[in-house]
Image (cartoon, helix red, strand yellow):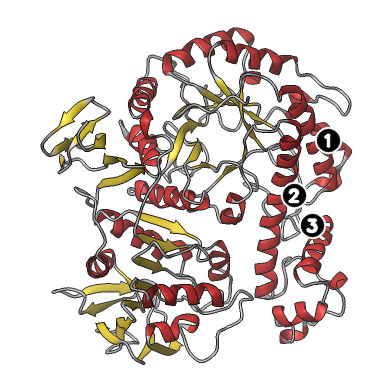
Amino acid sequence: MPTPLPALAFGGDYNPEQWPPEAHVEDRELMRTAGVDLVTLGVFSWAHLQPGPDRWDFSWLDEQMDALHAAGIRVDLATATASPPPWLTRRHPEMLPITQDGRTLWPGARQAFCPSSPVYREHALRLCRALGERYAEHPALALWHVSNEIGCHNARCYCEVSAAAFRRWLRARYDDDVDRLNHVWGTAFWSQRYGDFEEVLPPRVAPAWSNPTQQLDFLRFSSDQLLDNFVVERDVLHEVSPGVPVTTNAMVMRNTFEMDYFRWGREVDIVSNDHYLTAADPHAHRELAFSADLTRGTAGGRPWLLMEHSTSAVNWQPRNLAKAPGEMIRSSLAHVAHGADAVLFFQWRASRAGAEKFHSALLPHAGTDSRQWREVVRLSQILDAVEEVAGSVARNQTAILFDWDAWWGCELDSHPSVDVRYRDRAEDLHRSLSAAGVGVDVVHPDTDLTAYRLILVPTLYLVTDAAAAAVAARAAAGASVVVTYFSGIVDEHDHIRLGGYPGAFRDLLGVRSTEFLPLGEHQHVQVEGLGDELSSADVWSEDVTLAGAEAVATMVDGPAAGLPAVTRRPVGSGAAWYVATRLSPDGTDQLVRRVVAEAGIERLPGAGPDVEVTRRVSGDRSWLFVINHGTEVARVPVRGTELVSDRVVDADLVVPGGGVAVVREGRS
């Protein structure tokens, strides 16, 4: 039987090949002290495992696997294919990636390979099979870890190998019909019509803007090619080690958009994610909450693994700020609150050399006599105390629709305003809902929406007919639907939906716009009608005409002065709202209060702008997570057993500023 994962795993990347043998003994002793029960092993060890084309050295890995097992530590074993060794790229320079403007990306860092390279795939699968066959039955093995952060530095390659692979992908997508490709790409514009697939190239640097659907399809192809690299390794591992789950660490966060992780979530045995805070963002915990809910969405609502985050500063941002005391514990528990069943870090021991030597770790350069180490030990104790939540899920009545296709399409060039960013409205609505105590699922538009009473559709620029119809059907069946500007504008081919904006949602919303009226840089306008006082807006406005809806709020000034800013239309037993501008956070809060009340959404107790409250459930049991990101005491009306402090709560739960609590609700 495969070795199971720990219930609420704790640990991180372990790179013993960077350290002498005497450090390994200390590592295992300190891992036991810290409560580490799962490590990711061998991520960047290809050059150690295969020092030459026909030379292999597994002896060091054998020793590590055996020693970790003896120490009671389970292993997430990497296939080590994330970074080819220098001998391979020297023998096969044709496998190196090429940028959009024709520059070669050379060895000396990591991921120096073209994702479409058959040479890379041949050697990667050879290594993957060798590892799979050698360690399939090892008692320490709990999980396979394919590559690492696939696409992090080489998501798109524009070389001739990639061009040929792109053409094969296009032939499959368009049934080998070049006329169909011409129609979908709109090649009648600018004399781009193709007579043969062999004439098609990736969207390399061109004299002007490249064909937008060509760009969109290349983004789709690139994500699919990276996913296929995972799938072929996964299939080898399933063959040689049946029953051992296979994952790869995604990067669901604001600054990574190249991979369509909803598609990836269907292929992994268990979703895992790497997440790093943006140090310059004073409210980074809000982006964390959104990304964690989105990660849960890619997992189909099932628990997932936090594969990497940091104990403190990273090394790759312009200013790598240290986490404040207690911030690491709050961030870690926030991931658990949103569905993670593991809390892992990069990395176990801070590196002494290399590009990431200033990246924080569980065991810092200063050793155990450090605040970081003491917080690591405390976090481990907290995770042990709340371990019973493992396997539980969220059960929410509110959904935000999210789609990487729409993200890619929304942020193509030649659009009305560069200030329209895809995640912007989704994150702000999520922030407002969370502060109002509303649990949120972030799901793909094709998800079954039956369970949701409130559905938010932020900046869904690209949408299929079927997805738009499903949203309309839920409104007719009683849900409240909120659609923001620049939604429903194009179909899946990036073709404008004619007849007026917002295209696919025009009839549902009962509005029609004939012209976008984007605002200038730093231009702000006033909106009245959402609350007792005026609220502000920026970035966007449009000439909204009512066609069955009623105006809820109106633009006071700007190019759309006197026109509707927010509208509402009764639909069946539900309602459809349209937001035609970028509301300020206060304006978003006013809107959210109204739609939450209208939809009759259950609100979690004690939530606020700096007090994050979430609930996980399993059968008839539930756990309330309270994470106080502020400085003031939070009081939460809840009854049950507080697990972190192991005490019964019969009155309001008091959580100090910067504190955390997890309550098993009800009488014990």
Residue visible at 77% across and 63% down? 169
**For mark 2, what is the residue?**
115
Give the secondary structure at mark 1: helix
Q: Nearer the viewer, mark 2 or mark 1?
A: 2
Q: Residue furthest front?
A: 620
In the foreground, 586 or 223: 223
**Whether residue 655 is visible:** yes
- x, y percent for residue 267: 64, 48
- x, y percent for residue 139: 63, 18
Instruction: Judge left or right: residue 248 versus residue 115.
Output: left
Give the secondary structure at mark 3: helix
N-term-proximal mark, 2 vs 1: 1
Picture quadrant of residue 341 = top left
Quick check: 374 above or below 463?
above
In the foreground, 116 or 318: 116
**For mark 3, what is the residue?**
162
N-term-proximal mark, 2 vs 3: 2
- x, y percent for residue 231: 71, 46
Quick check: 234 above or below 472?
above
Residue visible at 54% across and 52% down? 256
